[in-house]
Amino acid sequence: MTPMDRRRFFKITAITGTTAALASCGNPENQIVRFIPDEELTPGVAVWKPSVCPLCAAGCGVTARVMDGDAEVFRSGQPGVTRMGLVRKLEGDPEHPLSKGRLCVRGQAAVQVTYHPDRLVAPQRRSGDRGSGQFTEITWDEALSVLVERLDATAAAPAQLAVLSRPRRGRRHELVAEFLRRFGAPAPVSFEIFDDAVLRRANDLSFGRHQLPTFDLARTSYLLNFGADLLGTWNSPLAHSVAYGAMRQGRGGSRPKFVQVEPRMSQTGASADEWLAVRPGTEGALALGLAHVVMKAGLRPADGGGRAGAQIEGWSGGLPAFTPEAVEKETGVSAERIERLAREFASYGPAVAVIGGAPLAQTNGLAQALAVNALNALVGSVGVEGGVSFMPQGPVPAAPARTLREALAAAPPQVLLLDDANPVFAAPAAWKVRDWLRQVPFIASFGSFIDETSALADLILPDHSFLESWVESAPESGAATAVATVAGPAMRPLYDTRSMPDVLLDAGRRLKTPLAPALPWQTFEEMLQAPAAEPAPVAAAPARSTAAAAPTAWRAPELDGSAGEYPFQFMPYPSQALFDGSLAHLPWLQELPDPLTTAMWSSWVELNVRTAETLGIADGDVVEVASAHGSLRAPVVISPGIGPDAAAMPVGQGHETFTRYASGRGANPLAILAPVAEPSTGQLAWAATRVKITRISGADGSLILFAGATRERPDHTRGRG
Amino acid sequence: MNRTRNNPLADDLIRPLLHTSVWFYGAVLVLATIVLCGAAAWAYQVWYGIGVAGINWPVFWGFYLTNFVFWIGISHAGTLISAILRLVNARWRRPVTRCAEVITVFALMIGATFPIIHLGKPWLFFWLAPYPSAREIWPNFRSPLVWDFFAINTYLTGSLLFLILPMIPDFAVIRDRSSGLRRRIYGTLALGWQGTTTQWHRLEAAMQIMAVAIIPVAVSVHTIVSFDFSMAHVPMWHSTIFGPYFVAGAIFSGIAALIIAMAALRRTLRLHAYLHPLHFDNLAKLLLLMSLLWGYFVFSERLTVWYGNQPSEMAVFWATQRGEYASLYWTMVFCNFIIPVGILSFRRLRTLPGIVLVSCGVLVGMWLERFLIIVPGLANKPLSYSWGTYSPQPTEIVIMVATFAAMALLYMLFSKVVPIISIWEMKVGNQPHPALPADEEEEQQGLWRARP
Amino acid sequence: MAHRWGMVVDLDKCTGCEACVTACHAENNIPTAGATEAGRGRAMHWLRVERYWEGDFPDVKVKFKPVMCQHCDNAPCEAVCPTYASHQTDEGLNAQVYNRCIGTRYCANACSYNVRFFNFFNPQWEKPLQLQLNPDVSVREVGVMEKCTFCVQRIKSGKSAAKADGRELKDGDIQPACVQSCPAGAIIFGDLNDHESRAARLTHSPRGTKLLEDEGTEPKVTYLQRQSWNEPDTQ
Amino acid sequence: MNAVYALYDNPAAVQRAVDGLRAAGVADADIQIMSSEPFEEYEFGHKDSASWIHWIAGLGGITGLTAAYLLTSLTQQAWPLRTSGMPIVAPWPNLIVIFEMTMLGAILATVLTLFVSAKLPRRLPPLYDTEVSDGYILVGVQRTSGQPLGDVTAALEAVGEGRVKHVGR
């Protein structure tokens, strides 16, 4: 190749106007390709562009601070450098009804998704054995032709095409569902370990709304929370936290009370005025016990429970089985305390009860949720200021027809498209997702990273990062008004990636037998700009239908494993930083000290102080945690915030393959869970496994704590020493 | 009384300069290798960053500062003791002064390198010096580190002069007794010294003034080193006792170092005729006194903290007394108090091997004392969330070992170029009374007994 | 009158979520230490949320306390610095001048709050993570001490924006990254010399305390203590 | 230049030689005595003693003190940076620097005085004998060329011991 001189360079630039190559100073091995920028930015001046945080289902609006800079990019199969607008920081969008200018810890770190060093820069085709993680870079033309070829081959048996994604709402998912429908394939399979299907089902039964609730924390006077990590990871944590700030200070009158009921102190529980340790899975019994006292004391009549009350067996009779004494036996909460809490809850309204997370991940999850719903209804907190309500919505997208469990029970499809789901990591090993996937002849992933599931793919068609593409969210809760957010790309793509909806649309056009009827949009952007269906006018207060359903009885949870052999109830919980493990690749979040243990870059098992003493375990010692379905090893954090017969462990670490920051780090508690389901929804009861714990060795240094001491005034005074 | 050529004194003392054994070269080689390893370790640290050391958040000072204080402490053996003995005109000082003063100079030089080694950006160490370094800003005279610069600078200058001035007449002796290149070198070093009465008088007067001046400087140096700690609000650092406590500790460790150096010289250079049991016995008594003083300071410090019962201080107190650092703490008490008092209090046990053994223990104990002052306090500051711990890394250990080797190496090389015992001062000492003939008798017989 | 920047942390609102911690990392180009170095005590968090347990199971409580540089009036870190790298600015900020720092680490020892962090190595961002760096904030090299600056770059740009618009700086114009991100609005920043500012008013709240008040450091961060629930008078 | 000297091996003889030279009318300032050690017990050892050297040391100390005071206070005022709420010119810490520089001034002045008044460094003058280093004590008188030294030689020989030597001539 002849070195390009300056004049010729300008000529090419003038002619093509788009891209050109410039040989670096006489060093042919070391060429720097400089792409011509095509956007105007003033150096050093920041521009703010809206976007939507994609990291959890909450769908908070963010603004991205864009400034120009030199980026090493990969475009049209060629690496190079260009000066372009780069997102430097994310902030909450002040105009957004959920985020109100604030942003949570995970949202702050979302920018690292775009700049992750292990992000895929171009389509990949598997070159090694399945699961070996060996891929070769290919062009989009090749990649698309492989995909289309496979889709064409399946056209004869369209039911053999499946899409596996997360249960998120929005137009992207509509598009996928539309594509499948027109292709003739069944509805997408969706999977999320911490999905709230049980609560939606309960709300449907209690209030006729198959939706997550919204809590008016800012105006409530009494918050009674059963196990939901509502300030950390559950539902719409950012919106909850914004409202929580207003609830605590910043309004006149008396300060509201916040009571948290849970077996292991969560970050949310840490902020409570009163913290009640309760036996795991008995939260519903406590709720019913409170309702019993309220009704018995005549503070509220039983029919206040309305439809929600009618869902509970024995409600109209005042729940005779749930006397404080009986509930004390069940839950471990003293009868006097139950009496007191019940009176407080009924007297200092508006009061709101919340349930979410682990209490619902039990075999009795539905009954637990119904109990709390009925309690809310009893004190008249539904649809009122300071109570619980439902966000008005457009027609709620049809619930995915299939859960992953259902799909796993059926024969594997011929072609599987993976979108943002990693069940190999996040589903219990007992589900044998990996074996199932290995039987699928062709898997294509749209992921930006090679994780445990996409490592099994034959083709990877990397999506843009959310900052590089059109994004939208249609949250189901978190604000009193309907919220739908759409934003354009905040920056140009760094690499040869393509927006997943566009790839689907493109593939649809290329099919031998076109989709019928064809999808009406050329691009996802077009779809987003097309007028969306008008939201159906829904009253803020839910309609109370009298549709009768068989009342549900609260029963003690069934746990997997005998109490004799497996003495500890195992409580995995979403990690504040890494959530369900899908964020374990972000270094900022890995190095974030956990709010309660201050651990970074680690896995750990939380054990009660006395339990650890009995087992002869010191902080940092490595133990084996074994269920009937598997075992793992992790260091121990001794905690005063957990009961003596429980063991808690954060989800998030234990990735085999998930970028340099997460691979081979810690242990995955989900892997050893029993495949126990909540019967009404089929949702995994991830808090229903029993384990045994054996000390393996002393500290091996794998537990990295930021804090040096756990108490503010350790006993170091003269008298004690 | 024959004072001239037949007197073996000058011959004995110059002999080491003229004859060198294979052992010497071997030892130099070994020590130089260790020193080079230390230099390489430092280069490695400069290249990769100070993070190769074990310091961390919140223990930002570790081995390097421990060694800094330790070596500055050792430096108190020489000039200070020599100056005091000179002022009180203790006759037995004469063979001791120079070998003591050399320790001061080298220990100070080694000690002063540690604040540079420990810097995050050691290539900018000269910003500590009083000149308008960056943007016309002079150093901050409120910083104890700048006080350190001034104190060490004054003490090093003073000690160096205090050492070198009395060497001039000895250089003249070597000049007159040698030929060729050596004569020219020592001729230059002798600065044209003739030994006129004026010169002798000026020298004696200067030494007298210097002795007076250097004593407060020496006291101030270790006081200021202690200020590095006591000026900061770190639990068990912020204490008014630190000045005298550090000075006493410095003299304590300094005497121990001097005893070890003298014992080594006596053996390797066969100076039995000059370094008498009396010298060791006197120094041992001084060591015992300092051990008792040290014990008194430690007790006062511990008692006030315990009685005061402030939580953050008590955290450090218990960490050292019975926690993480207890084994080091009790080793320190054993080495610095129990052994010295137990052995040196009894005349029968105060033998040369006994004294040397005690001195070695004191060095270990005093090193630990500095470590135990620096690290547990930083590791247990008031906000217990930020408590931490410290473990030294190989780089720090290699550099530390290298400085001990450097001390030995410098000392050996020095004893090869300068008479380690001042010839003229010995002669003066011999003037009125013949020195302790009984001693020499004993020496000849190779016996060592405590003197009555 | 000159500004005097100060901060108020309402512990009653703080949920310990640590949004402020990541926001601080993103805004101030704080290096990520990595697992090995974090395990050796080299993790850097200019702002940390301290957590303390109180009591024992089941009557256990947790206290969260976000701790950042307290920008003390009588900052113990300043005088001990031999090169004036640490000093008090005219606006009451405890400034750390990276170019003048030679890494004695004395300031970090003198600091009662342990809020100073040291660059043990040259910071590294694995490509292309360097693209996330904030161009308004310099990246610190090996051997340099660093700490919370109250987002001095935001103070500067806030002042110049007000000047460009020809208006007075209003309370709330300037928000450090932690203040801006805090979901519960627990952190308030403002000019303590402006008696109308929220920060100035809250500084005098009866709930206000200073961290390690008896050290005499005169911090410019005020902590509003958590309140407890009192049973309301039921008619 | 020419000179004559004698080497004695004991200080008593030296004292006699010095007395003899004085008796012969040689000025004290012209009598040079060189030895490898000071002889404070003899009268000749006290020749040329002076106490003004202490005053010079004190002067040096005052110089150091003034310099330190100016250094600290002027530099602190030149760029008034506030630290730890201390006054810009902070007296207590400055005292430490002032003390150290005072002592340094005194020490340097002392050494300087030594070198100047003892005429060091210098080339070794002709009137010297290496036997001084062997313990002999040299007593000599030096005169400009041509001046006779017979009286001196006689006085030195009158002591009865020692060896008389001539330089120059």
Image (cartoon, helix red, strand yellow):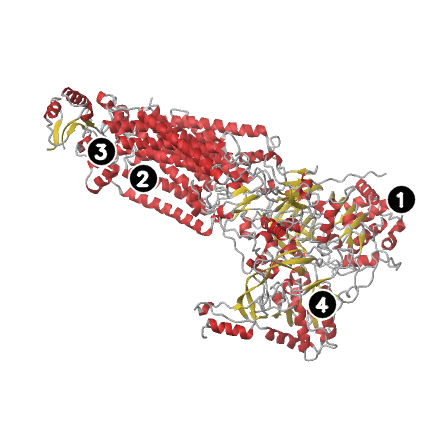
Callout 2 secondary element: helix
What's under tag 1, amino acid-wise? Gly
Q: Is residue A80 above or below residue C42?
A: below
Q: Which of marks 1 and 4 precedes in the sequence?
A: 1
Disc sitting over residue B412 in the figure: 2
Q: On the same chain: label 4 and label 2? A: no
What's under tag 4, amino acid-wise? Leu
What's under tag 2, amino acid-wise? Met
Write down the quadrant of residue B35 in the picture.
top left
Q: Chain of mark 3?
A: B
Residue marked by disc 3: B11
Q: Nearer the viewer, residue A313 or A33?
A: A33
Separation (CA) of disc 3 from disc 4:
103 Å
Residue marked by disc 1: A298
Using a 10 Å C-alpha cutoff, classify the residue at mark 1 as few (fewer than 14 neighbours), some (14 to 19) or many (20 or more).
Answer: few
What's under tag 3, amino acid-wise? Asp
Query: Residue A702: where, in percent of width, then height?
Result: 57, 51
Q: On the same chain: label 2 and label 1? A: no
The reply to whether discs 3 and 2 touch (Cβ–Cβ < 8 Å) is no
